Image (spheres, helix red, strand yellow):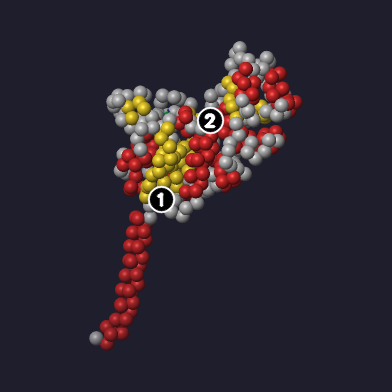
């Protein structure tokens, strides 16, 4: 009896400690279970919001029909992986995106990214210009938080539609701390690509998006797997800030081909283009008959930026096929013509010095 009285306080203390441990473990468990990431889905339209006449209509459909709340409701599993809320920013097919759409979307993303109740953002988007929007966000939104752009190649009404899993995967990536600081991302077909490198290289398959330097990773069954990071400047490392950009510079693209003339270049310049992206053959080559007009346009203050029409392969080498130093032209490095346009339109808001512009094309 005496011994029991002596050890009773010790037993009580041990019980208290174990209850406290149990409680903290339960709290941790409950916190862990309820601590889902807060992910905002900004919907802009595209095929992921498309609807076709029948389940067999995988390519014939109307884009930009399904509203964001129905997109979210269409993937009930989202509630298991994140606290999701949606905003309908636009409802358009992405071929109709303008610079103003890019600015409006970029400013909304930047504002939300600053909020403590937002851990990551998903932008649903048509696939036609998805790579341009993703690169734009990569250049101008200053946040470490994941920004994930996602689309689909088939409407949700089609057999083997890819939009549901693409959206689920995009929310997984946007809600994962492992995605922080990797720049704007594109999630399609189980792959995680850099918004800088990725391009739509096939126009009728679900494996439409590819990066010539490879995907950054994969997302499989709700988990992210990373294999590389982007070597170029982006987001918080960028000298460009959406909060200081209210208008993008007018930049046009002239496509290179046999028998071409300088008509497109001179027309665009007459319409006020500040820079022309020459989507040249091979290594950004310029037809002999077109060179004099471009040399003259440069003298008039229009920047000439040589890109390549070659789909997803290699990069343009300065002073190789053309004397860029002599003409004061710029090379777009490995950027395809449409991405070169995005970078030029952003860069020209900060400088019109050709050496500075070339530096920017090396670094971004
Ligand atoms: N009109 C195209 C677009 O909105 C449809 C392609 C798609 O979204 O996959 O980009």
Above or below residue 216? Residue 327 is: above
- The percent position of residue 345, horizontal first and vertical second, equals 60, 34
Q: Nearer the viewer, residue 238 or 28?
A: 238
209 displayed left or right of 285: left
Above or below residue 136? Residue 81 is: below
- The percent position of residue 280, horizontal first and vertical second, equals 61, 21
- Quadrant housing residue 7: bottom left
* Res 158 seen here: yes
| Residue at the limit of the structure toward the bottom, as seen here | 2
Q: Quadrant of ligand 1?
A: top left
Neighbours of disc 1 within 10 Å: few (<14), some (14-19), many (20+): some
Q: Which mark is residue 212?
A: 2
Q: Residue sitting at 70 percent across and 35 percent down?
A: 353
Q: Which mark is residue 129?
A: none
Mark closest to the chain's N terminus, 1 or 2: 1
Q: Nearer the viewer, residue 110 or 226?
A: 110
* Mark-to-mark CA distance, 1 and 2: 32 Å
What residue would you read off at disc 1? 38
Neighbours of disc 2 within 10 Å: few (<14), some (14-19), many (20+): few
Q: Which of 2 and 344 is in front in this view?
A: 344
């Amino acid at each position: 009896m005496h011994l029991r009285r002596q050890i009773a306080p010790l037993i009580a203390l041990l019980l208290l400690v174990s209850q406290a441990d149990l409680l903290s473990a339960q709290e941790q468990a409950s916190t862990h279970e309820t601590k889902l990431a807060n992910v905002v889905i900004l919907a802009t339209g595209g095929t992921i919001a498309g609807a076709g006449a029948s389940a067999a209509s995988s390519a014939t459909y109307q884009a930009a029909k399904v509203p964001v709340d129905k997109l979210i409701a269409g993937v009930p599993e989202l509630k298991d992986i994140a606290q999701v809320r949606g905003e309908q920013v636009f409802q358009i097919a992405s071929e109709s995106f303008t610079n103003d759409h890019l600015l409006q979307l970029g400013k909304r993303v930047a504002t939300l990214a600053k909020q403590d109740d937002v851990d990551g953002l998903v932008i649903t988007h048509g696939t036609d210009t998805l790579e341009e929007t993703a690169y734009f966000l990569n250049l101008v939104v200053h946040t470490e938080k994941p920004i994930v752009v996602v689309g689909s190649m088939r409407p949700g009404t089609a057999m083997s539609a890819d939009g549901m899993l693409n959206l689920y995967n995009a929310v997984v990536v946007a809600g994962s701390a492992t995605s922080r600081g990797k720049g704007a991302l594109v999630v399609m077909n189980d792959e995680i690509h850099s918004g800088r490198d990725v391009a739509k290289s096939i126009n009728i398959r679900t494996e439409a998006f590819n990066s010539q330097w490879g995907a950054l990773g994969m997302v499989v069954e709700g988990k992210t797997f990373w294999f590389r990071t982007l070597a170029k400047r982006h987001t918080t490392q960028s000298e460009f800030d959406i909060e200081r950009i209210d208008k993008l510079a007018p930049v046009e693209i002239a496509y290179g081909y046999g028998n071409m003339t300088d008509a497109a270049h001179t027309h665009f310049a007459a319409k006020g283009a500040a820079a022309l992206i020459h989507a040249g053959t091979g290594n950004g080559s310029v037809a002999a008959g077109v060179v004099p007009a471009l040399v003259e346009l440069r003298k008039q203050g229009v920047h000439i930026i040589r890109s390549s029409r070659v789909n997803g392969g290699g990069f343009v080498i300065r002073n190789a096929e053309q004397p860029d130093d002599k003409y004061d032209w710029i090379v777009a490095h490995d950027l395809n013509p449409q991405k070169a346009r995005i970078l030029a339109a952003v860069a020209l808001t900060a400088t019109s010095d050709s050496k500075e512009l070339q530096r920017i094309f090396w670094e971004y």
